[in-house]
């Protein structure tokens, strides 16, 4: 039975909402994200002892690149970009290593390190299918759930970021008003009014803080209206001296963690952007990682901190029900303008800390639930449950410095102190262990021609014989394989002589058949999901093929990458 539409999604990615609505939501996202984009390079440069000129340039470049890459993520240029609202901004994960790089080797060496790490992102984007057994929904969902865990301590610090001269009640009251207004409007309002819950909460909280004198306008008065700090560009060091090679492993490792976060973000935004559930489009995931690499390449060329996806856009789409690409374009355009208007950045930076912290707390709470949905959507059996629960609590333990910090800080140089890093690595390690300890797989490489089907049927019969499976199971497997061969032949954009790899494995009381062939144009998983309940005389031959496949199997998964498509089916051994 086709799933019911998710009426909470008012505008899908392909829809065109009113321009005023797109601009308004874009302004909300830009307003509440630009602080992190600006503060990250500011913290790095100041802590590393950088000059004021370099500080101005680093902030300018970070905002400029964030705007450019946010637009690329939204509109998708060829194979670069997700095609969804994915905000890009300065990566907080690199703060410590960037401080070390600038202090020990200079900003030009940091720039070259960031450019090299971008190459890793481009490589993984192009070859993502090779890592699909590691970067699973279980792993990515766990990483998404750990993002709020790593961010929440910062949010709680921001909540108390108020001058000592203000009354003690100023911070908690402004934060409470912000959360209360957002929650009340989101829960009770309908129609267009619900879309403005975030900005209404921020305005209300800022008014309360302003009543107590918590909205500082000093920086706003001192900032210039227009400026391009060209004198601060540090250049790029391409000599690759010893300090470069010492720092490179840490940069590469953190980039890998960033790729996992981007993968999780790109899956999560797909989950909340459509009224009807869809299978994950891994071509979009590849595009998101490639856009991330583009951002880091630009960050290296311009000498600022690395770029990454911001999860706040996912929570915003979930909260407002608006996932149209025009919103992402609006956010990017606002960033581009803001980069050249220092006074505009000063307005954003003047928003009181408790207000920003309260709003981000709401977004992170929503994001945690989205991580759970990703895990459950990938299939939450007892094995996945062990991976998720153990990885999550290990991440929490390391984030809170509760797991032998005196040992791991020395061995790993503090890398595991980040909960997302430690939990993500644990999830990857357990997933690899599970794959290695799984049942032995058999595979065969074939050519798609008239003689393929008999070879596949013999392969399946020999595979089932070693487990002494009943003839009925063998017939179901052979029938499912025949229908998939028909679909692969129809969907393939390449000649019939194209190679295909078939892998068979056993899992509990079921058999998995995995077909790897040339890239197709439609997702079989989606088409099976939305088949009508009744067969009629107008049903096409292709639809009947899909119905047979649905009848013969317990589940169908279809992953489409730029270079190949992978169709996996689960067939029950018993009737």
Image (cartoon, rainbow, N blue to C red):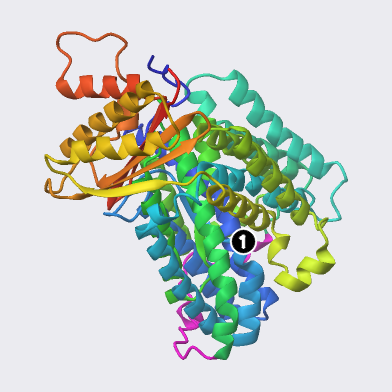
Quadrant of residue 479 within the rendered picture: top left
Judge by depth and name the residue closer to the eye, 298 or 529. Answer: 529
Q: Position of residue 453 (x, y in %)?
A: 20, 36
Label 1 element class? helix
Q: Is residue 530 magenta?
A: no
Residue found 52% across the figure and 19% down from its top: 190
How far across and how far down the image is residue 443, in percent?
Answer: 35, 48
In the picture provided, is 546 more to the left or to the right than 215?
left
Mark 1 highlights which residue?
A: 92
Crowding at dot 1, Cα within 10 Å, few <14 / some 14-19 / many 20+, comes out as: many
Q: Which part of the image, by quadrant, shows the C terminus?
A: top left
Q: Quadrant of the N terminus?
A: top left
Res. 414 in view: yes
Question: How far across and down, in percent of the image, does residue 552 sit?
Answer: 34, 22
Quick check: 340 above or below 130? below
From the viewer's side, name the closer residue of 44 and 444. 444
**Segment tinted magenta in the rendering:** 218-241
């Amino acid at each position: 039975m086709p799933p019911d539409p998710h009426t909470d999604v008012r505008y899908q990615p392909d829809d065109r909402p009113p321009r005023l609505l797109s601009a308004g939501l874009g302004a909300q996202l830009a307003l509440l994200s630009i602080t992190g984009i600006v503060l990250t390079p500011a913290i790095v440069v100041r802590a590393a002892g950088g000059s004021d000129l370099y500080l101005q340039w680093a902030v300018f470049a970070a905002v400029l690149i964030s705007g450019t890459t946010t637009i690329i993520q939204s509109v998708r240029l060829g194979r670069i970009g997700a095609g969804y609202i994915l905000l890009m901004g300065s990566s907080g994960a690199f703060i410590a290593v960037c401080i070390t790089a600038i202090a020990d080797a200079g900003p030009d060496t940091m720039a070259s390190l960031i450019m090299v790490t971008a190459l890793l992102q481009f490589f993984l984007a192009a070859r993502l299918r090779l890592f699909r057994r590691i970067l699973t929904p279980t792993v990515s969902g766990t990483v998404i759930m750990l993002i709020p865990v790593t961010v929440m301590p910062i949010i709680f610090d921001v909540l108390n970021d108020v001058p000592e001269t203000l009354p003690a009640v100023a911070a908690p009251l402004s934060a409470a008003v912000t959360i209360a207004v957002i929650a009340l409007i989101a829960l009770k309002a309908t129609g267009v009014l619900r879309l403005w819950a975030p900005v209404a909460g921020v305005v209300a909280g800022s008014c309360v803080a302003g009543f107590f004198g918590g909205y500082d306008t000093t920086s706003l008065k001192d900032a210039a209206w227009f400026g391009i700090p060209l004198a601060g560009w540090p250049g790029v060091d391409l000599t690759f001296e010893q300090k470069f090679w010492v720092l490179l492993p840490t940069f590469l490792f953190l980039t890998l963690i960033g790729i996992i976060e981007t993968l999780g973000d790109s899956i999560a935004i797909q989950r909340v952007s459509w009224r009807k559930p869809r299978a994950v489009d891994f071509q979009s995931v590849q595009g998101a990682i490639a856009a991330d690499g583009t951002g880091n390449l630009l960050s290296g060329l311009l000498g600022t901190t690395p770029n990454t996806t911001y999860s706040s856009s996912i929570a915003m789409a979930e909260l407002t029900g608006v996932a149209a690409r025009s919103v992402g374009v609006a956010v990017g355009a606002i960033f581009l303008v803001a980069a050249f208007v220092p006074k505009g950045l000063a307005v954003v930076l003047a928003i009181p800390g408790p207000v920003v912290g309260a709003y981000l707390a709401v977004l992170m709470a929503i994001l945690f639930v989205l991580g759970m949905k990703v895990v459950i959507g990938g299939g939450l059996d007892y094995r996945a449950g062990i991976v998720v629960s153990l990885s999550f609590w290990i991440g929490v333990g390391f984030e809170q410095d509760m797991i032998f910090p005196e040992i791991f800080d020395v061995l790993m140089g503090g890398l595991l102190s980040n909960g997302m890093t430690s939990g993500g690595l644990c999830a990857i390690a357990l997933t690899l262990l599970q794959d290695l300890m799984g049942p032995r797989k058999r595979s065969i490489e074939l050519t798609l021609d008239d003689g393929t089907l008999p070879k596949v049927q013999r392969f399946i019969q020999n595979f089932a014989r070693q487990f002494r499976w009943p003839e009925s199971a063998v017939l179901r497997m052979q029938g499912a394989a025949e229908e998939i061969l028909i679909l692969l032949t129809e969907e393939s954009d390449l000649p019939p002589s194209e190679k295909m790899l078939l892998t068979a494995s056993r899992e509990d009381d079921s058999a998995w058949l995995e077909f790897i062939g040339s890239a197709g144009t439609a997702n079989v998983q989606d088409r099976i999901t939305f088949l009508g309940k009744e067969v009629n005389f107008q049903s096409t031959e292709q639809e009947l093929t899909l119905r047979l496949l649905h009848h013969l199997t317990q589940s169908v998964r279809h992953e489409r990458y730029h270079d190949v498509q992978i169709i996996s089916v689960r067939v029950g051994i018993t009737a």
